[in-house]
Image: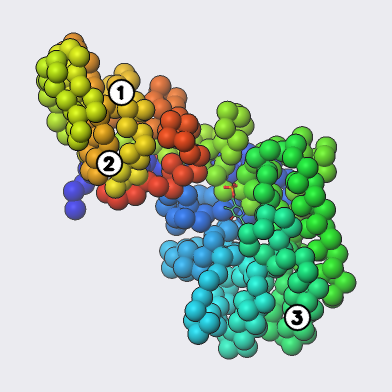
Amino acid sequence: MISSPAVQATVDHSALTHNVRLLVQASAPARVIAVLKANAYGHGAVPVARTVLAAGASQIGVATLAEAFELRAGGIEAPIIAWLHAFDPDEAVPAFAEAVNLGIELGVSTSAQLRAVSEAALRADSLAVVAVKVDTGLNRGGFVRADWRAAFACLANAEAAGAVQVRAVFSHLANADRPECHTNTEQARSLREAVALAREAGLDPKLVHLANSPAVLTRPKALVNGLPAFNATRPGVAVYGLSPIPDRDFGLIPAMTLTARVGAVKRIQPGDGVSYGHDFVAQEPTTLGLLPIGYADGLSRALAGKFEVTIRGKRYPGVGRVCMDQVMVDLGPGDPPVREGDIATLFGPGKDGEQTADDWARASGTINYEIVTQIRGRVRLRHSNV
Ligand SMILES: *Cc1c(COP(=O)(O)O)cnc(C)c1O
């Protein structure tokens, strides 16, 4: 293996620790379920899990069972909840049974899932721990209101039969990044109604959770219009130091820094076109730097001509089309202090003048969530300050 890869995403664990502590404080007295789906938003699920648990998160949330299994295989023994399931009916029961054996809490959203979980619990060695996901207005996953009573009755039966234990009732917000939006209050009220129905049915959920990152971080204001944190929260993007609301500073520190080594430095003349299609044509003699990162690695083609890298403390613009494996930057007309092998920073926390994932999001018409989760391909994840 090459010990010093050309393209690296370095994850600063001291930033993760800072962010989790901030989220624990903002959530208190509710506990924090740190959301580590999609390989911890591209940051590396197993190492991130160790750090967020040490920093005070009490549980880990993921979307799929495969993600939960990966964490268990990586030695993570803390409580894990997985809430997104889509199985071939023949595969659901064995998959849930494996989850039960591994002590993974199952978020359930449909009656077919409920039946499969109950059956899996009978096969497995222990109780299936279940969190009921109720749809309170996002109209994505979760039991719709008309099915709440039936789902809770079915779960009460399964509890009486000794197959399952309902640990939580939870829901997800549609407009948490707009804290003043009336749907937040309405969804909170609906969740309270769902919990009341669950109790009427004889269930005793210990945890109730609704808040994602923006809800946790805007809670002081949102509390005024009635959005409670209940007794657990599920922050995701804020764990990684990214603001869930563009242009709002919550004191988070971005954890990921993306760097690439300069692969070549070359002089071009006026009239020379650069990269496919010659979208960029030099107006004066200039020097180009080649970076070995492209759209197959998560540097979107939409960023062509709209990003800048930092090399030796100075910013240089990307020029020409972003290719699959590489992109060019314009080092300017003078004699640039840039050499082959130098390290270019594409984005990071911004403290050394480099661009941020937020800058990339703005420039390419997306959200910072997509910027970090799309980093892939030949980018090597490295972990610092672990
Ligand atoms: C992704 C996700 C979260 C975390 O959302 P952020 O906006 O990243 O904080 C919380 N809950 C559910 C159900 C999710 O799917």
Q: Which residue is rendered at x = 65% and y = 73% of the image?
A: 110
Q: Is residue 176 above or below residue 103?
A: above
Residue 50 shows in the view: no
Q: How many marks?
A: 3
Horizontally, residue 85 falls left or right of residue 25, namely: left
Quarter-of-image position of residue 226: top right
Image position, residue 247 (x, y; %)? 58, 28
Q: Nearer the viewer, residue 235 or 184?
A: 184
Residue 114 shows in the view: yes
Horizontally, residue 222 falls left or right of residue 64, namely: right
Q: Is residue 365 above or below residue 285?
A: below
Residue on which the image places disc 2? 294
Residue 111 circle label: none
Residue on which the image places disc 1? 317
Quarter-of-image position of residue 316: top left
Q: Which residue is rendered at x = 33% and y = 20% of the image?
A: 315
Image position, residue 380 (x, y; %)? 30, 47
Distance of label 3 from label 2 (alpha carbons): 51 Å
Residue situated furthest right in the rendering: 200
Classify 10 Å Cα crowding around label 1: few (below 14), some (14-19), many (20 and above). Answer: some
Q: Nearer the viewer, residue 328 or 256?
A: 328
Residue type at mark 3: give it. Cys
Q: Which residue is rendered at x = 88% and y = 72% of the image?
A: 200
Horizontally, residue 354 falls left or right of residue 297, namely: right
Q: Which residue is rendered at x = 54% and y = 75% of the image?
A: 99
Q: Nearer the viewer, residue 342 or 49?
A: 342
Residue type at mark 2: give it. Gly
Residue 154 circle label: 3
